Image (spheres, coloured by chain):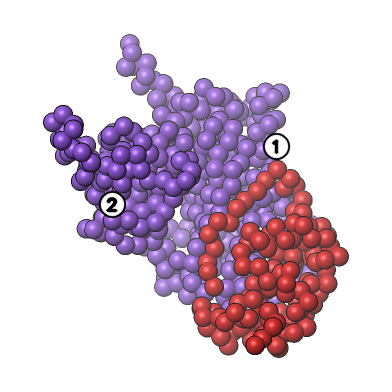
Amino acid sequence: MSTTLLPPEFSDLEPFAATWCLETERERFAQRGVSTMDDMQPFYDAAIARLDEARAYLDTRDVHELNEQDTNLMHLLFSLIQVSFSVELWRQARIPDTGAAAIDLWLEAPL
Amino acid sequence: MARYAKPAEGSWTEHYPDLGTGPIPTEDSISPEFFELEREAIFKKAWLNVGRVEEVPRTGAFFTKELVVANTSVIIVRGSDGEIRAFHNICRHRGNKLAWTDYPGEEIRGNCRKFTCKYHMWSYELDGSLSNVPQESEFFDLDKDAYGLIPVHCDVWAGFIFINLAEEPEQSLTDFLGPMVLELSEYPFGEMTERYAYRAEVGANWKLFMDAFQEFYHAPYLHGGQTPSKFTHMIQEYGFEAPFYKIEGPHRVVSTGGVRGEEQPIDMIKPIEAKLRSGLFGPWEHSTAEDVSVPGVNPGNADPWGLDSYNLWPNFVILIWAGGWYLTYHYWPTSVNTHVFEANIYFVPAKNATERLAHELACVSFKEYGLQDANTLEATQKMLESKVITEYVLNDQEVLVRHLHKEARDHVRAYRSELEGATS
C-alpha cells in the first residue's frame, strides 16, 4: 500500500504535500495567508522547477478521472499558483491594499 | 495623444450630449433617502438577472435568491413541463418563508418534488399550485386554487434567467434588453459550463463597485503591483484607453484592446504565466467554443482585442474575454453603503490538466485584482460619506461611470414624479 500522497515520480515534492495538497481554494488561500515567505519560497522553488513535468504527466491522464495521488498532485499545483503571487509579486503572504476585503469562492469546478 | 479614434464630437462623453461633461454629484452613493427610492424606482421595476438555466437543469431543480433590496426572497424552479418559473418564497398560510434550511437568511439550492412549508406542512406543486393543507376541513371554505404561490414575472434570454418584481412589467424582457444587448444572443454561453462562483460582502454603495469595473483608467495604478515593473511602467506611461464605448438606453458597453500572451517579452510577464500560458486575460490558447465571433462581440474591431464588458441595467454585467470565456458580475444592494458582490467565471470545460491549470491561474488572478478593488471601494465610500466633497470630476474614459449615475438619478427622479402625480 502506498504511503505517499504524490505519485512516485514526484517524490521530491513529497515534503510539501502534507501542507499544500488542499482540495479547495478556500483552504489554499487560507494556507497562503498563514504562511511566511520562508515557508513558501522553498515550496515555490521546488514546485515550479517540476511544473512542466508535472503538467506533462497529468496530461497523460483523464483530468476528470484522476486517481488519489494524481488529484493530490493537481491540488499541489493549484497551491503553487496561489503562492506564486506572494513569491513573484508581493514578497509577502498578504495581497497589498486588501485589508478589509474578502471574496469567497464558494463553488469551484470539481476535478 | 489618443491612440484610438474618438467620435466626431471629439469625445465619447460628448457623443452622448445628455451626459454633460461637468462634475457629478456624490449624493446618490451616500444618501439613505436616495437608496430607499432606488428600491422602488430601480429594483422593483427592472428585469433582474438571477442566474442561468444550467442551475436548474431538470424538473424540480430550484434555487432561492435573497433580494434584500426589494425586501423579498424568490424561488426559481424548473417545472415538470420544463418551464422555469419564479415565485415569492412565502407560504400563503401565515407567511413563513417556504424554502430554506437552518438559516432563514441564506440562499439554498437543490431538487424537490414539491415545496412544503416547515411550519404547518402546506405543500405546493412545482407550478406553484397549493396541493395539500393538513386538517383542511378546519379552515372556513378554503379555496386552495386561490392560495397558490405568488408568481414573479420570469423570462429567459440566452440562458440567463431574469425576474421582474413589478405587478406588470413596463417592458417585455426583449424590449428591456434592446438591440445592443440582444446582439449577444448567439454567443455560446451554454457551452461554457465550468463554473467558479464568488461572493463578497462589500462596504460600499452598489454603484461604486460597478464603477470600478466599468472604467479601466484605474488599472495601471491601483493594480500596478500585479505585473512585473517593466510592464507596469509601460502601461502607466501610456495610460488606459478603450477603443469603443456604446450607450443604449440604460445599458452600456466598453470594449478594450488586449495582448497576445505568446508575443509578450518574458520580462513583461510573471514566470507562472509563462509556464501555464494564462493570466488575468485568461488562457492564451483560445477556447474551443463553437463560434465566439457573433455580432456584438468585439464591436470596436480591436486587434488584438481584450474584452467586452456589457453593463446591463441595473446591476448585471456580462464580461466576454477574447479567449472565449466569460464572467458575470452582480451587485445586490443591502443598504446605502453595503452590497453583496457576486462574480461567476465560466469556461468551456477543461479537457486536460493543462487547460484546467490555465483556468485556475485566470481565476486566482481575478481574485487578486478583485480584492484590491473591493477594499478600495470601502475607502471611497467612507470618505464620500464625510461630504467633504459633494461632486466629482470624470474623464472621457470614465464615461460609463457618468452614465450609470445619471441613469440612477433619472430613474429616481421619474419615480418621485410618479409619486407626486399620484398624490396631487
Helix, strand or loop status at disc 1: helix
Placement of the C terminus of chain B among the 4 image quadrants: top left
Where residue B231 appears, as percent x and y from the top left, is 76, 62
Q: Which amino acid is tagged 2?
A: Lys
Residue B114: mark:
2
Q: Which residue corresponds to the image point at 59% horizontal and 47% vertical from the top-left?
A: B200
Q: Is residue B182 among the parts visible in the rendering? A: no
Q: Is residue B136 among the parts visible in the rendering? A: yes
Q: Which residue corresponds to the image point at 55% horizontal and 56% vertical from the top-left?
A: A106
Is B415 placed left or right of B28 in the picture?
left
Where residue A63 appears, as percent x and y from the top left, is 54, 79
- Asked if the residue under mark 2 is in contact with the one under mark 1, i.e. CB atoms within 8 Å, the reply is no
Q: Which residue corresponds to the image point at 18% horizontal and 38% vertical from the top-left?
A: B136
Identify the residue position indicated by label 1 in the image: B379
Where is residue B39, by image quadrant? Answer: top left
Which chain corresponds to the colour red?
A
Is residue B221 or residue A58 the one in the foreground?
A: A58
Q: Which residue corresponds to the image point at 78% horizontal and 71% vertical from the top-left?
A: A44
Q: Chain of mark 1?
A: B
Q: Chain of mark 2?
A: B
Is residue A29 or residue B9 the one in the foreground?
A: A29
Q: Which amino acid is tagged 1?
A: Ala
Helix, strand or loop status at disc 2: loop
Which chain corresponds to the colour purple?
B
> Which is more N-terminal, label 2 or label 1?
2
Q: CA distance from mark 1 to mark 2?
A: 46 Å
